[in-house]
């Protein structure tokens, strides 16, 4: 895919004004950084950061019993929440692989709004359309809405300055107005910090982003790109599809069993996942924190006593801890637990790591 083939979000011109560098991600041209990944990461942890994540998918499921239909397909149990709340869930295959992980917004019994990952939106929509009962429509609205994430300790201050609602529970959302245009305000995020995600209409996105960045900068924060998004989510141990989740990596292996409604009568992949739960997953995600100097990356061998026991799925330098960290899938038979020491093969060098239970840093979402 050439640069000319990449999709662009609704505020490409604003990113260029802010001095962004770009890279392809999920078929989109994405801002990677503005002033540097470490500075942007630290802004989110200490003040506030603003991300444009309009590449994320959007889809609606509408019609009589739409919520029940979605509940019969995805893993988590919508019966545990109510309209006005959102839920992390997974779209799985019959054998327990993960087509995608996504956020499902419970609008009403007859309407669900879904936010999948960019590259997987078409696949999720196609799977739902295959089995949607008569009267229920599934619509891909990928480029109907922008998505901005305002994340960090001063995020509430930023939204309040624009007259947007902030007094809501974690994983709740409200449909509001800003300057006469609709915007969905959600208490969600992918950084581990207190924050919000805003969904304006595509054509209204630029004006809202400009208003947000003015308030973010006034609060001592900054625009943040894909680089900081990755370091922040890795510190939290949050899975990224294609790394910690995939058609070959099940929710149980990625520590996402909490997002499965085991008591539900049905969901895609239930039989396979129930069996895997009973048998125990053959591998499990762990965090690795470097004891030696270096940086870990995806696809490196994890060794114990010189023998391979797993592979890293994500790796980076942690700006918060100031050491290299990674997420890794480790064979269950290796009997590894938190506190153990392993090695990672980094281009022929064996670097010592401590095994930890993610997250690496404190979660502050609530």
Image (cartoon, grey):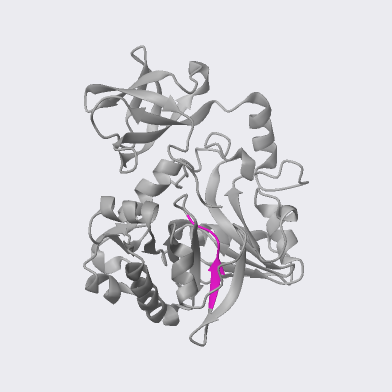
Q: Where residue 107 appears, x then y in whole percent?
A: 67, 69
User: Is 295 within the magenta?
Assistant: no
The magenta span reads 183-189
Residue at (47% x, 49% y) in the render: 192
Q: Nearer the viewer, residue 331 or 224?
A: 224
Q: Where residue 212 appears, x then y in whole percent?
A: 39, 73
| Left or right position of 292 against 187 | left
Residue at (54% x, 70% y) in the render: 185
Q: Where residue 326 appears, x then y in whole percent?
A: 37, 35
Q: Is residue 189 above or below residue 239?
A: below
Q: Nearer the viewer, residue 298 or 46?
A: 46
Farthest-out residue, top: 305
Quadrant for residue 322, please give it.
top left
Q: Where residue 288 appears, x then y in whole percent?
A: 39, 30
Q: Nearer the viewer, residue 83 or 179?
A: 179
Residue at (52% x, 22% y) in the render: 332
Residue at (70% x, 38% y) in the render: 271
Q: Quadrant of the N terminus?
A: bottom left
Q: Is residue 73 visible?
A: yes
| Left or right position of 185 against 10 | right
């Amino acid at each position: 895919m050439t640069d000319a083939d990449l999709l662009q979000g609704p505020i490409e011109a604003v990113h260029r004004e802010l001095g962004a560098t770009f890279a392809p991600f999920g078929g989109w041209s994405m801002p990677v950084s503005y002033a540097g990944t470490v500075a942007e990461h630290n802004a989110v942890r200490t003040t506030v950061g603003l991300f444009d994540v309009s590449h994320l998918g959007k889809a609606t499921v509408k019609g009589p019993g739409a919520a029940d239909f979605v509940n019969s397909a995805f893993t988590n149990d919508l019966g545990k929440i109510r309209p006005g709340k959102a839920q992390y869930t997974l779209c799985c295959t019959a054998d327990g692989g993960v087509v995608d992980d996504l956020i499902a917004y419970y609008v009403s019994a007859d309407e669900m709004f879904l936010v999948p990952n960019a590259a997987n939106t078409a696949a999720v929509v196609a799977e739902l359309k295959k089995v949607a009962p008569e009267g229920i429509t599934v619509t891909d609205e990928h480029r109907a809405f922008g998505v901005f994430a305002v994340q960090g300790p001063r995020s509430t201050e930023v939204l309040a300055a624009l007259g947007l609602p902030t007094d809501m529970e974690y994983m709740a959302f409200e449909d509001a107005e800003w300057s006469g245009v609709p915007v969905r305000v959600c208490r969600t995020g992918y950084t581990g910090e207190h924050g919000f995600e805003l969904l304006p209409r595509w054509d209204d996105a630029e004006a809202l982003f400009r208003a947000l960045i003015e308030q973010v900068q006034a609060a001592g924060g900054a625009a943040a790109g894909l680089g900081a998004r990755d370091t922040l989510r890795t510190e939290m141990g949050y899975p990224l599809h294609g790394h910690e989740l995939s058609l070959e990596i099940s929710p149980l292996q990625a520590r996402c069993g909490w997002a499965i409604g085991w008591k539900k009568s049905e969901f895609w992949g239930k039989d396979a996942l129930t069996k895997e739960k009973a048998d125990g997953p053959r591998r499990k995600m762990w965090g690795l924190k470097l004891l030696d100097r270096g940086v870990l990356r995806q696809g490196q061998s994890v060794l114990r006593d010189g023998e391979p026991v797993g592979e890293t799925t994500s790796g980076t330098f942690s700006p918060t801890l100031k050491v290299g960290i990674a997420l890794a899938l480790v064979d269950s038979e290796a009997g590894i637990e938190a506190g153990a020491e392993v090695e990672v093969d980094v281009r022929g060098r064996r670097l010592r790591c401590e095994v930890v239970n993610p997250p690496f840093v404190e979660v502050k979402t609530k």
